[in-house]
Amino acid sequence: MTEEQKNERTIRTVRRVLTVCVAAGFIIYLIVTRQTAVITRFDNDSLSISYGEQVSVSIPFNEIISVTLTDALDTGTPVAAVTDARVSAGTWHSDVFGDYTLFVYMNVQQLIIVESEQGYCAFNLSNANDTKLFYEALLTSVNAGE
């Protein structure tokens, strides 16, 4: 094998190694930075909120005591929470609610607070307008079930 053939072979090997490293790095980046959304929905008889597989709550409408929309809430401190770049979710403790469940997009100030027989749950959607619209629809559904 000539010197030139050895150099070409070395260059091909280096290219393959670099390609594998870049691909592996990209896959790791996708895994680490994967952002999960808060899934908020209701059907005819209950409200369900979840954040990935880590945190979820289901509240039957007949157990809901009140639903309010607020622009200001001292969330308190996390007890068992999951946080990524956009969302905090889990059990929190505040002076107002005691231990409660929180699902919050941190860049959205508005929060829906549901008081139920299970306790309190505070959440929002990914923007203020959607949060307000969801609040209005939830309030209508809860009131219809009374």
Image: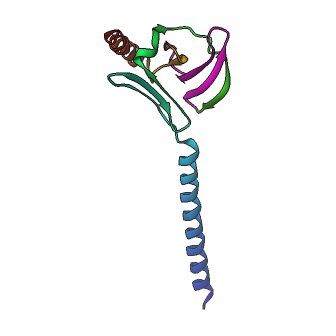
Q: Residue furthest bottom?
A: 1
Please say whether residue 128 is one of the residues in the magenta stretch: no
Please say whether residue 94 is one of the residues in the magenta stretch: yes
Residue at (31%, 11%) from the top-left corner?
Answer: 144
Indicate the quadrant containing the N terminus: top left, top right, bottom left or bottom right. bottom right
Percent x, y for residue 12?
55, 74
Residue 105 visible, this angle = no
118 relative position to 137: left or right: right
Residue 70 visible, this angle = yes
137 versus 49 height, above or below: above
Percent x, y for residue 21?
59, 61
Indicate the quadrant containing the C terminus: top left, top right, bottom left or bottom right. top left
Residue at (56%, 42%) from the top-left corner?
Answer: 33
Residue at (66%, 18%) from the top-left corner?
Answer: 93
Work out whether residue 51 or residue 24 is closer to the camera in this orientation and state it.
51
Magenta residues, dominant SS class = strand
71 versus 127 height, above or below: above
Q: Which residues are magenta?
A: 85-113
Residue at (46%, 8%) from the top-left corner?
Answer: 68
Work out whether residue 48 or residue 15 is closer to the camera in this orientation and state it.
48
Display coloring: rainbow
Percent x, y for residue 37?
47, 33
67 relative position to 121: left or right: left
